[in-house]
Image (tube, rainbow, N blue to C red):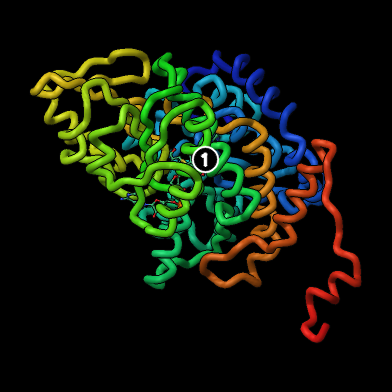
Amino acid sequence: MRGENSVVKDPALAPEGHRKIEWAAAHSPVLAAVRERYLKDGTFDGLGVGVALPVEAKTAYLAAVLAEAGARVAVAAPLPSVVQDDVAAALAERGVAVFATSEGAPEDADRWMELALEAATAGGEAVLIDDRAGLTRIAHTTRRGLLPRLRGASEETTSGVVRLRAMEREGVLELPAIAANDARCKYLFDNRYGTGQSTLAALMQSTNLMLGGKRVVVLGYGWCGKGIARYAAGLGARVTVCEVDPVRGLEAYADGFDVLPALRAAEVGEVFVTATGNRRVLGEEHFARMRDGALLANAGGVDVEIDVGWLRSAAARVREARRHVEEFVMPDGRRLRLVGGGMVVNLTAGDGHPVEIMDLTFAIQALCAYRLAREHAAMRPGVHLLPREIDDEVARLKLGAVGMGVDALTEEQRRFLAGWRE
Ligand SMILES: NC(=O)c1ccc[n+]([C@@H]2O[C@H](COP(=O)([O-])OP(=O)(O)OC[C@H]3O[C@@H](n4cnc5c(N)ncnc54)[C@H](O)[C@@H]3O)[C@@H](O)[C@H]2O)c1
Ligand SMILES: N[C@@H](CCSC[C@H]1O[C@@H](n2cnc3c(=O)[nH]cnc32)[C@H](O)[C@@H]1O)C(=O)O
């Protein structure tokens, strides 16, 4: 069985993992519909699928659906801190090659991704479902020999799409890559509502503190930041937004939030959440102004938004205040508390996005993989968008699953919108 080559913490944890995967499956009607309509047509028979994603129940259900469709699936975690060991064990037991243990070191992740690439391509060609272009980067650097076997990659994250576009600009991207993140059924729901709910759930669960009345500073008012600000306001927090894009800052103001430069916000905030995909958004100069007890968390897809290295080197003392909460006592006695290690907090200190959100995201991912598998030969190397009709279909499937629906334009309306004489 392919799962036998896996790297997991403890196969005996599988029963709890199976329960979690069954729960995810039971709440994923859109992916189930995609499976019935498309994935069973033989496209995936014997095809490799390399997956780099947080190893938790929704990811496992996606992998299981692709395996059931005939694919040889290999999954690697992009970080040890986003691995649920029981789910990893259950997935390996279902015949998927899994390279993921929470006990690994961050440096192990590249090795896991190399192993997943090798496993996915061992029997022939493969497509990739990627996180922050990790598998794609490895296929263009340390495992270039595997490139000819890759039909293409589908990218999950905003930060990954940024990387792929950088590769395309430099003329080094040798694969067709679909920006799954840029599908409307992905970013409008996953980045906004998924990150909003799961980031605040992780913060509340880890700290057992109340958000109502607190001054929450959200850094970055993109899709993730909008969701975090909205959910925080819904819980009664007083929200301040920091941006570098004046239009997005103005949007935050019109949405009812204060908008301040980060150095000023540092003085008033009690909770700080970064969601920019950028580096050192909170650093020494911000920490110096923060009040005693400030909570810090990162919801962005890169782990350099908060300068944790500086905090660690400058602190007089560091201790684990609670599970997932590190307390840095500064030389002047102030305590700054970091939730989730400065990595993506909803996954390192929580269960990730709600199942219904990942149902949409993974329906999009499954359709991207399906498209790459079938149409790769006609796709040039470079970044591609998912055609709008596919996005529309996923939205229709979801509306149908919740007993709702939309209208279709009449012929008269279509002509009116397409013309100019009337
Ligand atoms: N936690 C999750 O589950 C999750 C989900 C989706 C995306 N992400 C990640 O979150 C990050 C943001 O994603 P997004 O879709 O919101 O991106 P986005 O491009 O829509 O928004 C990012 C925003 O950050 C702003 N920004 C950049 N540098 C800044 C700085 N120094 N200070 C203040 N603002 C700054 C930009 O102007 C932009 O408005 C990415 O890394 C993405 O991969 C995380
Ligand atoms: N690069 C990070 C993870 C990416 S965060 C951003 C992505 O995580 C995805 N995500 C959020 N919650 C979940 C989940 O519960 N399961 C799988 N992926 C998730 C989400 O779609 C988003 O685009 C790492 O090193 O692990």
Please state if 244 lies on the left or on the right of 182 as rendered.
left
Please state if 327 lies on the left or on the right of 224 as rendered.
left
Indicate the position of residue 391 as horizontal and vertical percent values: 70, 55
Outermost residue toward the bottom? Answer: 421
Residue at left offset 54%, top offset 18%: 11
Indicate the position of residue 7 as horizontal and vertical percent values: 47, 29
Residue at left offset 79%, top offset 77%: 418
Determine whether 409 is above or below 358 in the image.
below
Residue 83 in sight here? no
369 or 156, nearer to the observer: 156
Residue at left offset 74%, top offset 53%: 43
Indicate the position of residue 277 as horizontal and vertical percent values: 38, 48
Indicate the position of residue 289 as horizontal and vertical percent values: 18, 34
262 or 274, nearer to the observer: 262
Q: Residues within 10 Å of mark 1 (few under 14, many from 20)?
A: many
Residue at left offset 50%, top offset 22%: 85
Determine whether 304 is above or below 251 in the image.
above
The amino acid type found where label 1 is placed reads Gly
Determine whether 324 is above or below 375 in the image.
above
Determine whether 98 is above or below 255 in the image.
above
Please state if 117 lies on the left or on the right of 216 as rendered.
right
State the quadrant of the N terminus. Answer: top right
Residue 264 in sight here? yes
- Residue 287 sits in which quadrant? top left
State the quadrant of the C terminus. Answer: bottom right
Q: Which residue is mark 1?
A: 227
Q: Of helix, strand and loop, which one carries label 1?
A: helix
